[in-house]
């Protein structure tokens, strides 16, 4: 009853909507005021550009059914209507108005005076009343709406069944008989008639015990039928015996009883013939053989194919069933066609060594492509002399073996150190030749060592959590920098890369160790070059600035000295830049002897040097004399002209450098010597 009530409640909605529309369209006392407001709103519109949305807004505001704007020629520019056919005149005649700006004509329908406009409220009210009345009727008791019981129909002795029911009975997988309350046959299906060898029409009206000779399997012949054996009826599915022409048939039976005493009896065959069972078993076996992932071929004594499964047909690119009758040598010409002395029986079960000595077998597909064959041959147990062939496509296996062989050679021949560690204990399981040679241990010795034996400086407390994340798959790779210890106790820097392989059981860690001795030396060399002058091997200007900045904070009493060589330009022009470089390098070597207490000696520019002296120097004239000693060149003797500018640091680097530079210029203008506060 719930669904009809919901349907009637939903049906109320159209009536309520019609009632609301009708009441909204009813004339009001302010019609003239509304028209004036509407005309004012229309006058503000641009008739040529007004859209449907703007018209809809005006219509809803002023309670219109429809509105339309037409140009001077009568073509519609824009229109909107609340209901279909609102502009047809059914809701009344339209009101016309001319737009003062563009001359466009505006028509609107207010539904006052129209047929539907006046009748719509009454229609909505009537529909709602009708639906409410229907809802009230649903509250009446169910017996008040129940139809009167019809008189029972007179039954005949042998009622007939509908045609559709007869078709259904004939299509059932078992034998079915329908009987009336007097146990007289009404209908049997085609399967039961076939079992009994009788015409179904002959059995109609006969007593069921006479038409259906059925008895309990444990009862003797002539026993009463089991379906009406008093109150102790046999349970459903119990076996019984049906007497048929030429013998008996064991069946399982089940009966359904109607209130009027009629019944339907169903019989299922419980004794399939052995041939049918064998055929079913062979079909199941064939299905299993076809589903095997390997090819199966059965041959006769002459090596011709008697039976093949689908996998074998697919391997040789033949259709299922087309291989029967073909010679094995056609499918596998190598070696059975080009080497007649090789027979299929030579590939019967042998030891692995004997199997490896046999010639390789190559399969020939129908499209002329070939593939390596894995062949296993067994004798059949019958007396046919045939063979059972198990065939595999070894293409992928050979590719995998080749890849593993290549990886194995790469593993052994690479210069990198590759070690396989047990993921839990970290003991070495495998090590390539590079690791054994670099570390100086044999593989047997390495297998008694763990990662922390190889890298004694590795902190196990910090490394174990990282290894745990690597084993758990939370980290893909672990990189470490440490030192490996050789057998001779020497150590060398290595960069380690560890990855975990959880596909193996137990899981393993693959360790790739790269000897970075040369890299560390190159890094040290680059670091030295970045802070030193290549000619004089003294610190360069950038390194000197860093040292001077530290000294300004730590040694405020120190002195800065700028030393410059004059006359190098003429020397370079006369003898070449190489000779000038010899003079610069010679003066740089003499700086250490001239200023043994200097904290810093650096090349400041091309022919200038900077010195950091811890305290005001003594004996500057003697030091300059040492620097001005002649320099022997291959073709001449150079006399360096040395000038020195001195300034106290006082904790301020830039002012001290500027003061030293001014002192140096004064010394150079004076022809050499030194200037500044010593």
Image: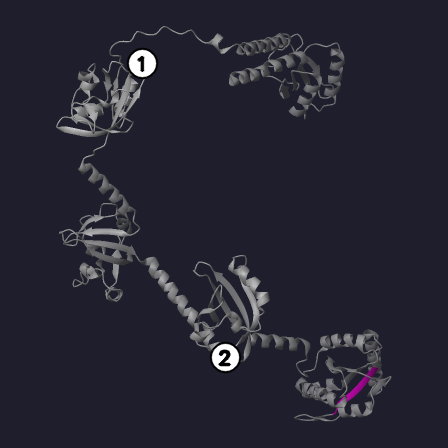
When the figure is inspected, residue 165 is found, relative to residue 668, above or below; the finding is: above
Residue 47 falls left or right of residue 430:
right
Q: At numbered mark 2, what does the secondary structure look like: helix, strand or loop? A: loop
> Foreground residue, 586 or 79?
586
Q: Which mark is residue 200?
A: none
**Dominant SS in magenta:** strand
Determine if the magenta segment contains residue 297.
no
> Which residue lies under the disc numbered 2?
487
Describe the colour scheme in one phrase.
one colour
Image quadrant containing the C terminus = bottom right
Residue, far right: 677
Q: Residues within 10 Å of mark 2 (few under 14, many from 20)?
A: few
Q: Position of residue 497 (x, y in %)?
A: 52, 66
Q: Position of residue 331 (x, y in %)?
A: 22, 54
Residue 161 falls left or right of residue 86:
left
> Foreground residue, 378 or 257?
257
Q: Position of residue 676 (x, y in %)?
A: 86, 83
When the figure is inspected, residue 594 is found, relative to residue 184, above or below; the finding is: below
How far apart marks 2 and 1 lie (CA) works out to 103 Å
* Magenta span of residues: 639-646
Q: At numbered mark 1, what does the secondary structure look like: helix, strand or loop? A: loop
Image label count:
2
> Which residue lies under the disc numbered 1?
260
Would residue 212 be seen by someone viewing this image from the given angle? yes
Q: CB of mark 2 within 8 Å of CB of mark 1? A: no
Q: Residues within 10 Å of mark 1 (few under 14, many from 20)?
A: few
Front label number (2 vs 1): 1
When the figure is inspected, residue 536 is found, relative to residue 188, above or below; the finding is: below
């Amino acid at each position: 009853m719930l669904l009809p009530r919901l349907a009637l409640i939903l049906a109320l909605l159209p009536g309520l909507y019609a009632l609301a529309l009708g009441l909204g369209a009813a004339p009001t006392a302010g019609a003239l005021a509304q028209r004036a407001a509407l005309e004012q709103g229309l006058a503000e519109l641009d008739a040529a550009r007004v859209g449907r949305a703007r018209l809809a807004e005006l219509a809803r505001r002023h309670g219109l059914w429809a509105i339309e704007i037409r140009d001077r020629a009568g073509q519609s520019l824009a229109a909107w209507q609340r209901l279909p056919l609102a502009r047809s005149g059914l809701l009344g005649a339209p009101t016309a108005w001319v737009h003062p700006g563009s001359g466009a004509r505006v028509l609107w329908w207010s539904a006052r005076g129209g047929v539907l406009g006046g009748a719509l409220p009454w229609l909505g009210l009537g529909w709602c009343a009708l639906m409410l009345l229907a809802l009230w009727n649903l509250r009446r008791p169910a017996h008040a709406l129940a139809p009167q019981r019809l008189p029972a129909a007179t039954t005949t002795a042998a009622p007939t069944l509908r045609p559709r029911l007869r078709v259904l009975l004939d299509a059932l997988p078992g034998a079915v008989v329908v009987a009336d309350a007097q146990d007289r046959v009404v209908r049997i299906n085609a399967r039961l008639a076939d079992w009994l060898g009788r015409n179904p029409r002959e059995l109609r009206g006969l007593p069921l015990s006479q038409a259906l000779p059925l008895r309990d399997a444990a009862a003797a012949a002539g026993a009463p039928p089991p379906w009406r054996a008093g109150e102790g009826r046999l349970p459903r599915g119990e076996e019984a015996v049906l007497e048929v022409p030429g013998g008996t048939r064991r069946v399982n039976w089940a009966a359904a009883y109607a209130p009027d005493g009629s019944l339907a009896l169903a019989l299922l065959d419980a004794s399939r013939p052995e041939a049918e069972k064998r055929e079913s078993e062979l079909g199941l076996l064939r299905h299993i053989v076809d589903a095997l992932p390997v090819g199966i071929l059965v041959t006769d004594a002459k090596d011709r194919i008697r039976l093949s499964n689908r996998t074998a047909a697919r391997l040789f690119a033949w259709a299922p069933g087309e291989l029967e009758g073909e010679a094995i040598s056609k499918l596998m010409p190598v070696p059975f066609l080009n080497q007649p002395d090789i027979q299929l029986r030579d590939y019967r079960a042998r030891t692995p060594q004997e199997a490896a000595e046999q010639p390789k077998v190559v399969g020939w597909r129908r499209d002329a492509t070939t593939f390596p064959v894995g062949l296993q041959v067994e004798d059949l147990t019958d007396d046919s002399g045939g063979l059972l062939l198990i065939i595999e496509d070894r293409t992928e296996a050979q590719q995998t073996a080749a890849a593993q062989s290549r990886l194995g050679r790469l593993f052994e021949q690479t210069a990198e150190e590759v070690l396989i560690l047990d993921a839990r204990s970290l003991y070495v399981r495998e090590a390539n030749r590079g690791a054994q040679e670099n570390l100086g241990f044999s593989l047997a010795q390495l297998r008694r060592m763990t990662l922390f034996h190889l890298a004694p400086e590795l902190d196990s407390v910090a490394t174990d959590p990282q290894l745990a994340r690597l084993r758990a798959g939370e980290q893909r790779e672990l990189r470490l920098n440490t030192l490996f210890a050789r057998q001779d106790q020497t150590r060398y820097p290595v960069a380690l890369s560890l990855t975990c392989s959880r596909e193996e059981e137990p899981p393993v860690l693959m360790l790739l160790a790269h000897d970075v001795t040369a890299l560390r030396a190159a890094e040290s060399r680059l670091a030295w070059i970045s802070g030193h002058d290549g000619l004089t091997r003294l610190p360069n200007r950038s390194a000197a600035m860093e040292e001077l900045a530290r000294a300004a904070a730590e040694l405020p009493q120190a002195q800065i000295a700028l030393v410059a060589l004059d006359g190098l330009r003429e020397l370079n022009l006369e003898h070449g830049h190489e000779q000038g470089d010899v003079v610069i390098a010679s003066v740089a070597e003499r700086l250490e002897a001239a200023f043994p207490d200097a904290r810093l000696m650096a090349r400041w520019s091309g022919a200038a040097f900077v010195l950091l002296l811890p305290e005001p120097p003594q004996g500057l004239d003697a030091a300059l004399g040492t620097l001005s000693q002649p320099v022997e060149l291959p073709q001449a003797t150079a006399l360096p002209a040395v000038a020195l500018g001195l300034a106290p640091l006082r904790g301020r680097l830039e002012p001290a450098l500027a003061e030293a530079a001014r002192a140096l210029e004064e010394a150079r203008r004076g022809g050499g010597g030194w200037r500044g506060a010593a």
